[in-house]
């Protein structure tokens, strides 16, 4: 295993027209999401929910609660999240209600035209429940293309191919940025964006293309 074998495996997936078409449609749908203020907020809530949880679980809850994100108070939202099986209903309800409170500022920032790296740092600093991974996930899901979502799936693949030595429980900012640079070089070599690369890596690890 090594860098060459990872590139070979990824090229095989990228050259699969069926998978590539799914990935490109997903990227297009992300771009469409940012045209809607409400859909963008729902996506922010989804990314808050997935932290230390699962993408599938967050997606299921997002579909059940999309309207409630905008109207439920913290107590009622926490109760609904609990009934839907979220591991951390109270904290996630608090984060979502707080995100709703500052959403005007969030919306202004993501549409400011600033460097996406600056926008990500702002989100991590100002939105409760978002670390670098979650902020990157949110920005990717609303159409930003050159930020890496470094989750356990990605780390597992990089570790398997010898590109990271271990799979840490937590990533510091410097470590996150270092791994993001590794992924940026892979994306550049494959002539895809980091947003596309993440979906291909997810497919490599799970056989699915989620968001």
Image: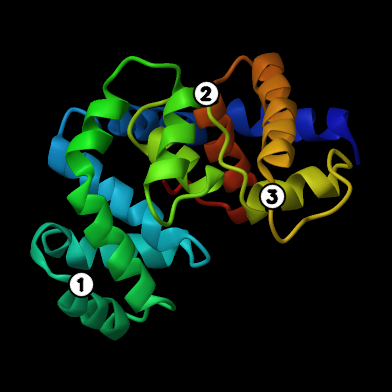
Judge left or right: residue 65 versus residue 119: left
Label 3 – label 2 distance at C-alpha: 19 Å
Regarding residue 124, the answer to whether it shows in the image is yes
Where is residue 203 drawn, in percent x and y? 57, 46
| Rendered position, 91 above or below 62 | below
Circle 3 sits in a helix, a strand or a loop, which is it? loop
Residue occupying image coordinates x 28% and y 69%: 93
**Quadrant assignment, res 163:** top right
**Quadrant assignment, res 94:** bottom left
**Quadrant assignment, res 80:** bottom left
Label whose residue precedes the other's in the sequence (3 or 2): 2
Q: Residues within 10 Å of mark 1 (few under 14, many from 20)?
A: many
| Rendered position, 118 above or below 88 | above
Residue occupying image coordinates x 78% and y 43%: 158
Compare residues 126 and 87 and report the one nearer the observer.
126
Q: Which residue is mark 1?
A: 74
């Amino acid at each position: 295993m090594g860098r060459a074998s990872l590139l070979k495996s990824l090229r095989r997936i990228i050259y699969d027209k069926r998978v590539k078409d799914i990935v490109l449609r997903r990227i297009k749908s992300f771009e469409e999401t940012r045209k809607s203020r409400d859909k963008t907020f729902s996506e922010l809530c989804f990314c808050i929910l997935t932290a230390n949880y699962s993408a599938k679980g967050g997606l299921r809850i997002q579909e059940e609660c999309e309207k409630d994100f905008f109207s439920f108070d913290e107590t009622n939202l926490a109760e609904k999240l609990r009934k839907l099986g979220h591991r951390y209903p109270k904290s996630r309800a608090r984060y979502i209600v707080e995100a709703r409170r500052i959403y005007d500022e969030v919306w202004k920032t993501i549409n400011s035209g600033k460097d996406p790296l600056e926008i990500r740092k702002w989100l991590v600093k100002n939105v409760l429940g978002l670390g670098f991974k979650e902020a990157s996930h949110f920005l990717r899901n609303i159409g930003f293309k050159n930020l890496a979502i470094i989750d356990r799936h990605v780390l597992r693949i990089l570790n398997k191919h010898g590109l990271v030595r271990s799979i840490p429980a937590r990533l510091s900012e410097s470590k996150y940025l270092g791994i993001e640079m590794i992924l940026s070089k892979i994306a550049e070599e494959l002539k895809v964006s980091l947003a596309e690369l993440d979906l291909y890596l997810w497919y490599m690890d799970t056989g699915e293309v989620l968001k």
